[in-house]
């Protein structure tokens, strides 16, 4: 294996490589590290045929197989040459793509959307490829790959927030199961800061997913007398049960203020048993609180389900579609006011980036 210095201008990136998004701050840090200590791991390139051209239309001698991030850092550092390993393999375009995916799949810098698109491309272009086999090839579970593929159902707006890290993968998977209109409605609510974090967003999206395909009697006027009576009985019973929790709260607060030494004397011989009893109560409270959070999500999701955002979403899409010369607008259409472009949402503060899964010097 020969390592040689090659001019940066002789190399171009593979336009079909799986990585699309690069953190500029991380690239600058890598560039400073390379200027100070040099490049620890050479990039890998292949010699291009004379007939091949890069994305900018200029013919280059080499194409990157692995190391586009290090190559970009060299450009930022304004270095003229970069250490390279020149491979003489005869891999196909798809085989080189898979190799690049394998290089990046377990690194935090590869976004969930990039993984999803990479898996989709392999499944589409490789003869006989199946999800299970692709998952095994990259050391992932079938469920992992299926969940990534589900992200491709996200609207472009949501995909951008997933790529930036503002929306986590777990929430994104739940949102992906929604119709485009409901996704837009969730994003509108999210942009207003309605969710304390990803966990609340997961609950809300899951609740909306359960409701979006159901026809439910939403208001009392739509219900039969028997249904209204049953609804009222449920309300009375549930509210009464929750009100009684306040009585238990008083007892717990009294116990929390007790002197531990006196408590030990009062419960002599039963402290362990009583602690087990409290643990059961605490476990029940945790489960009940979780259920109440889901109930809150369902209550908020019901408002969106009642408004039928998909109808509005489709209407706006139809109005936004440009008319061809063969289909001139009618007088009525010409007089109709154009829909206003929605205001750009205020994106909540970006979540902290997850811990790196590998050295930032690698790609």
Image: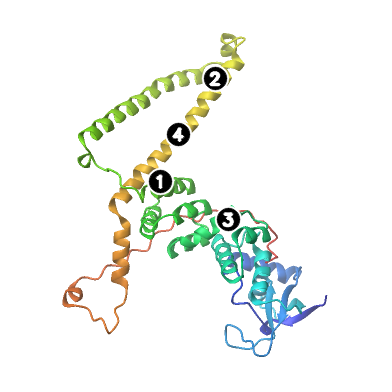
Q: CA distance from mark 4 to mark 1?
A: 16 Å
Q: Is residue 153 above or below residue 57?
A: above
Q: Residues within 10 Å of mark 4 (few under 14, many from 20)?
A: few
Residue 353: image tag: 3
Camera-side mark, 4 or 3: 4
- In the figure, 175 relative to 296: above or below? below
From the viewer's perspective, tell me whether residue 40 is left or right of residue 122: right
First-in-chain label (3 vs 2): 2
| Crowding near the residue tagged with mark 3, few <14, some 14–19, many ≥20 C-alpha atoms within 10 Å | few
Picture quarter with the N terminus:
bottom right
Instruction: Please give the name of the residue rendered at 19% of the width and 77% of the height, measured from the top-left corner.
Output: 330
Q: Residue at x 51, y 27 (%)?
A: 282
Find disc 2 in the rendering and name its residue: 277
Distance of label 3 from label 1 (alpha carbons): 27 Å
Dot 2 alpha-carbon crowd within 10 angstroms: few under 14, some 14 to 19, many 20 or more:
few
> In this rendering, which labeled residue sits more in front, label 3 or label 1?
1
* Residue at numbered disc 4: 289
In this picture, residue 60 sits left or right of residue 227: right
Residue 115 x, y percent position in the rendering: 58, 63
Mark toward the start of the polypeptide (3 vs 1): 1
In the rendered image, which residue does mark 1 sit on? 207
Residue 93 appears at what percent x and percent y? Answer: 65, 76
Q: Give residue 140's position: percent from left, percent from top.
A: 64, 56
């Amino acid at each position: 294996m020969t390592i040689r210095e090659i001019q940066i201008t002789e190399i171009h990136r593979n336009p079909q490589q799986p990585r699309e998004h690069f953190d500029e701050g991380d690239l600058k840090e890598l560039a400073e590290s390379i200027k100070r200590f040099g490049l620890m791991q050479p990039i890998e390139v292949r010699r291009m045929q004379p007939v091949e051209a890069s994305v900018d239309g200029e013919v280059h001698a080499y194409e990157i197989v692995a190391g586009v991030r290090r190559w970009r850092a060299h450009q930022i550092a304004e270095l003229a040459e970069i250490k390279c390993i020149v491979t003489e393999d005869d891999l196909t375009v798809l085989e080189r793509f898979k190799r690049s995916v394998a290089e990046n799949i377990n690194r935090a810098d590869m976004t969930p959307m990039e993984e999803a698109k990479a898996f989709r491309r392999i499944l589409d272009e490789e003869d006989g490829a199946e999800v299970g086999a692709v998952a095994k090839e990259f050391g992932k579970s079938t469920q992992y790959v299926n969940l990534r593929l589900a992200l491709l159902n996200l609207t472009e707006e949501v995909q951008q927030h997933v790529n930036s890290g503002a929306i986590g993968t777990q929430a994104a998977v739940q949102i992906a199961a929604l119709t485009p209109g409901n996704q837009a409605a969730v994003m509108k609510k999210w942009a207003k800061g309605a969710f304390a974090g990803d966990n609340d967003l997961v609950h809300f999206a899951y609740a909306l997913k359960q409701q979006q395909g159901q026809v439910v009697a939403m208001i009392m006027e739509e219900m039969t007398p028997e249904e209204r009576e049953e609804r009222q009985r449920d309300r009375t019973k549930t509210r009464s049960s929750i009100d009684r929790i306040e009585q238990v709260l008083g007892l717990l607060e009294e116990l929390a203020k007790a002197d531990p030494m006196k408590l030990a004397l009062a419960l002599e011989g039963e402290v362990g048993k009583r602690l087990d009893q409290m643990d059961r109560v605490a476990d029940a409270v945790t489960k009940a609180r979780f259920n109440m959070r889901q109930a809150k999500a369902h209550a908020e999701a019901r408002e969106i389900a009642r408004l039928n955002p998909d109808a509005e979403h489709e209407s706006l899409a139809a109005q936004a579609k440009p008319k061809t010369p063969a289909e001139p607008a009618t007088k009525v259409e010409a007089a109709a006011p154009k829909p206003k472009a929605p205001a750009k949402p205020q994106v909540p503060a970006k979540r902290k980036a997850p811990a790196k899964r590998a050295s930032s010097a690698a790609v």
